[in-house]
Amino acid sequence: MKNLKRPNQSELDAMSHADLCALIMQLFDLLESIESRLVKVEKNSKNSSKPPSSDGLKKGAAEPRQVGEKPTGGQKGHQGVTRMMVENPDVIEALYPIANICECGATLDKESASIKERRQQIEIPQPITITTEYRKMEVQCQCGRVHSGDFPLNVTRNVSFGARLKSYCVGLTHGHFVALERVCEIMNDQYGVKPSGGSVQKWILQAANNLAADYVVNREALIQAPSAHFDESGLRCNGKTEWLHVATTQTHVHYSVHESRGHFAMDAAGILPNFKGIAIHDHWKSYWRYNDCEHALCNAHHLRELRYCEQLTGESWAINLRKLLVEGKEKVAQAKAEGKNHLEQIIIDDLLSRYDEQIKTGLESFPVQPHEDGKKGRQKQHEATNLLVRLRDFKTEVWRFITDWHVPFDNNQAERMVRPVKVKIKVIGGFRSVGGSEAFCVIRSIWETKKLNGINPFDTLRGVFAG
């Protein structure tokens, strides 16, 4: 698109009638071009922060991989996993020849057989329940005193469910997002035992209560972290929209739920008010209230928004800015592969200089509109202008990933922790009470933290119910 220079009043006065008509026609052509783009370009998950679920059924198939783009099979650096034979299998089944007689007529001596080849197969045990009866015994001393044993803490009166069964039900609901009623059906189909939905809900609250101390430990670990990722997403609770907030590092996760999306919720979670590291987020305005920490922005969001501006305007600055950000990411990856611990200053200066140049070019096409006299509130700006101003004013936060290698290119760590929860919301529709959502946050925080540290979360739940 050809950029039109705004003429001043003296230039307009000097124009002939023919020149003015030509300028008007150019403006109409430009307006028609922009209107056609506005009609055709719609925001979706690939060019904005909208979730993939909002694309609907018209989003089409995934883009096919280009020939030669990547080799087939496992990619370079991929850690392959091969199942290894165990030295002491649980069951050994020897396979002898079906016929006990050789073609020569002699009888085969099985005692002299040797192993020709070994193959192993992994199988799960037959699903059965084991009923354990606990008998409280008493013994009378010769002096007349009576002594008796004590039941384990998790064994209640009459007939109760064991720790393994309880942890399995809670893990299915909050670990793997199976609906409450279906968990009860699975237990009945597999083991012939059907706990009630109310019982499973009681176990969920019990697990959350017993994991409360670990939940606090997670929060304290995040407060002390050199950098942490933050994100938020909506959910339904008690028929109203509330917000799930997540803070995470490579080793700890903390979920919390609040009626507010903003700083009231962040204050209630208790992490950001005390955080002194680098907060990585998606530019939600509430994060900027916290001045004791530094900030870094998610460039995956910027790439999508620049793609939208590219489609909307057709101008090269949007393409060039996307390429610059990706180039910076590749420069850091290359330097790390070469064993370096920082990027050379000449490379940083070159990237930032070209970045400033493209921002300037973009703002020449989409300048900031001055505030209209007498109009209340902020002056509305073009979407491209808003993005360019943000990239300009928060340049340090955008490019922090090249100067501080504790900071990744994007905020995917937090977003990966939010996405599974959206599956949970789709399954159950929402939480019926605040207590249910808070219990979910506690259990899910510990569940994800254990997985990040290579610990089986079911083992943790079994320990909770075993007392």
Image (cartoon, grey):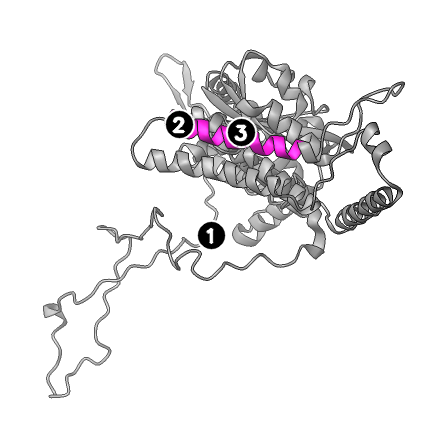
Residue occupied by mark 2: 346
Q: Where's residue 88, x and y in %?
A: 23, 50
Q: Quadrant of residue 101?
A: bottom left
Any mark on residue 127, and which? 1
Front residue of this view, candidates 14 and 339 = 14
Q: Residue at x 65, y 46 (%)?
A: 52
Residue 429 in the image: above or below residue 136? below
Sooner in the amino-acid sequence: mark 2 or mark 3: 2
Q: Position of residue 446 (x, y in %)?
A: 50, 29
Question: Please, what is the three-letter code of the amino acid marked with disc 1?
Answer: Pro
Residue at (81, 32) in percent of width and height: 11
Q: Position of residue 24 (x, y in %)?
A: 85, 44
Helix, strand or loop at mark 1: loop
Number of residues whose C-alpha sits closer than 10 Å to that of mark 3, classed few (under 14), some (14–19) or many (20 or more): many
State the CA–CA distance, disc 2 to disc 3.
42 Å
On screen, residue 191 above or below 107: above
Q: Earlier in the sequence, mark 1 or mark 2?
A: 1
Residues at marks 2 and 3 touching, judged by CB atoms closer than 8 Å:
no
Q: The magenta stretch spans which residues?
A: 344-363
Left or right of residue 364: residue 96: left
- Distance CA(mark 1)–CA(mark 2): 64 Å
Which amino acid, by three-letter code, is at mark 2?
A: Ile
Type of residue at label 3? Answer: Ser
Main secondary-structure element of the magenta-colored stretch: helix
- Residue 176 higher or lower than 256, as above or below: below
- Judge by depth and name the residue closer to the eye, 235 or 70: 70
Residue 229 lies within the magenta run: no
Near mark 1 (Cα within 10 A), the count class, few <14, some 14-19 or many ≥20, is few
Q: CA distance from mark 3 to mark 1?
A: 30 Å
Answer above or below: position of 303 versus 238: below
Q: Nearer the viewer, mark 2 or mark 3?
A: 2
Residue pointed to by mark 3? 445
